[in-house]
Amino acid sequence: MRPYIVIKQIVDFMMALIGILLLWPFFLIIAVIIKLTSKGPVLFKQKRLGKHKREFYILKFRTMRTDTPSDMPTHLLQDPDFFITSVGKFLRKTSLDELPQIINILKGEMSIVGPRPALWNQYDLIVERDKYGSNDIKPGLTGWAQINGRDELSIEEKAKLDGEYTTNITFVFDIKVFVRTVLSVLKSDGVREGADDQDVTSNTKGVTL
């Protein structure tokens, strides 16, 4: 194990702990707004793959209706506006829906920076990541692929970028990804909602609709 990996785990825990202590009022406000504006739970849980492909449940603020097709990437939905709630649009655009993943970090299931956790049935992505060893590190709240295209990337491109991060994990690299993430969120770079017919044909291999 590389020395920085040990330090990274400690930093992740401390940053997540500080984050949840500072941000709990926002958690409460968002939770109340979600509850008042749509039916269903405040939090959305979805099965993802973590380090060494162990399954865990990622946490997000719920941004979609409860009748949305499960275990399907949102950018592949034919009519996302039909499923995304009015509050959900804002949460997704600002990435505030991802805040509950601080809990996943505290539990040791995720890191602040790392490959975004794949859905359990995104078999193409999982196989591609195996080529680079990216399934053997903790997934992240944000990652190198996230700031270099996100939903606009092909499976192969995404896995290659995840591989670059896996091979070159350093403190400086993590800081670079974190800073660029903040800038990307402000500009909503790489966020895509919905799919055309070509997207569905070429990107749903292994995905249960």
Image: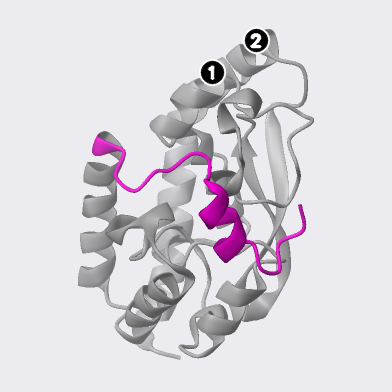
Residue 200 falls inside the magenta stretch? yes
- Residue numbers of the magenta segment: 187-209
**Left or right of 138, for residue 11:** left
User: Element under label 1?
Assistant: helix
Q: Residue 37, percent across and down?
A: 65, 10
Can you give x and y, in whole percent of width and height, for residue 73 in the image? 60, 51
In this figure, which residue is indicated by the disc labeled 2?
37
Q: Are marks 1 and 2 in contact (CB under 8 Å)?
A: yes
The residue at the far front in this view is 197
Residue 63 visible: yes
User: Please, what is the dominant secondary structure of the magenta stretch?
Assistant: loop
Q: Which residue is mark 1?
A: 87
Q: Amino acid at mark 2?
A: Thr
Going by the image, does 115 lie left or right of 106? left
Residue ID at (52%, 56%): 198
Q: Is residue 70 above or below residue 21?
A: below
> Residue 149 in the image: x percent, y percent?
32, 57
Query: Disc 2 on helix, strand or loop?
Result: helix
Whether residue 108 is visible, yes or no, is no
Does 118 sit left or right of 168 as displayed?
right
